[in-house]
Image (cartoon, helix red, strand yellow):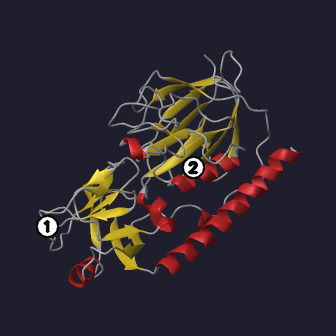
Amino acid sequence: MPEPGREPGPRPGLEVLRPGLQTTVQDAGRRAAALGVPGGGAADPLSLRLANALVGNPPGAAALELTLSGPTLRFQADALAALCGAPFAASLDGQPFPLGRAVAVRAGQTLATGATARGARATLALRGGLDGEQAFGSRSTDLWAGFGGHAGRALRAGDHLTWGDASPARPPRAFLAPGLQTATGPVHVLRVLPTPEAAPPLLAALTRGFFTVSAQADRMGARLSEGVPAPHDPARVSLPNVPGAVQLPPGGQPILLLPDAGTHGGYPTPLVVASVDRPRLGQLRPGDRVAFRPVTLAQALAALRAQERAIRGVEAALRGWYKEA
């Protein structure tokens, strides 16, 4: 049955020739934590918003999330596409495919994305927004639970994806300034807010120097290699988790929580990454170096407002361009 507002009929589509390392359908995520369901959504939500704005989509429309090595896609219909995020190598029928701008793709063309030397993820948005299975109000793929997106899993060769109806449009003559996009590694200084569990000795240990992102990094979280003395409180109860929280398991190696993290946990969480820097968590890759810089709530909010003003300005300008086109 078609969804409200969408007419029945064949959809434009593309075929997955090569799936890449882990390519999934992601949108702005879901609000079902009260049911024990992680929020999910794009690991780098800033890249999702910018890519969608470039093709004239709503900010939270579903798109493809590429991880470390991207897919090869053959288009079976004309499309308007934009790639934002980590600097993945990309070509369209052998010609360079630029990042940070909208590009018209013709039916029969092949978009090939390779690897990225910095950062971990990029978003490929298509005008009209990707179709996909909805679960708890979102098309985002939850790889652990196996629902949402494309059959609840990462793409495979031979998959067929479709996108929603949208009026044809020429790509705007606009490209994103590099400073608008999420910063990629290899060094990250993250603004953090200490919680009541950040006793002075623990806070000093966590903010003294750099940590290294270990190989245990996925959409649930990124474990850091170096350890700090971890508090032990067997009476501590499980409390709600939020993306951006810095957990401290008994081994003392901090874990930065990402969108697919569980909704509750029993480990102490002495730090929370400020919302303005949360998109950077989606760009962490093994070997990157991470330091924590404490800020006040007022400083965190001021930085977030400044970022929002810049991004909303871009979204408004592109929205106006498509309205007049």
> Which amino acid, mark 2?
Leu
Position of the N terminus, as image quadrant, is: top right
Residue 230: name its quadrant. bottom left
**Mark 1 burial class by Cα count in 10 Å: few <14, some 14-19, many 20+:** few
Residue 241: name its quadrant. bottom left
Q: Position of residue 292 (x, y in %)?
A: 35, 75
Q: Which residue is mark 2?
A: 48
- Front residue of 165 and 139: 139
**On the picture, is 220 further left or further right than 10?**
left
- Front residue of 260 and 14: 260
Q: Which residue is mark 1?
A: 233
Q: Position of residue 24 (x, y in %)?
A: 45, 37
- Front residue of 196 and 128: 196
Secondary structure of the residue carrying tag 2 is: helix
Residue drawn at (45%, 81%), measured in percent from left and top? 296
Mark yes or no: residue 313 visible. yes
> Which amino acid, mark 1?
Asp
Position of the C terminus, as image quadrant, is: top right
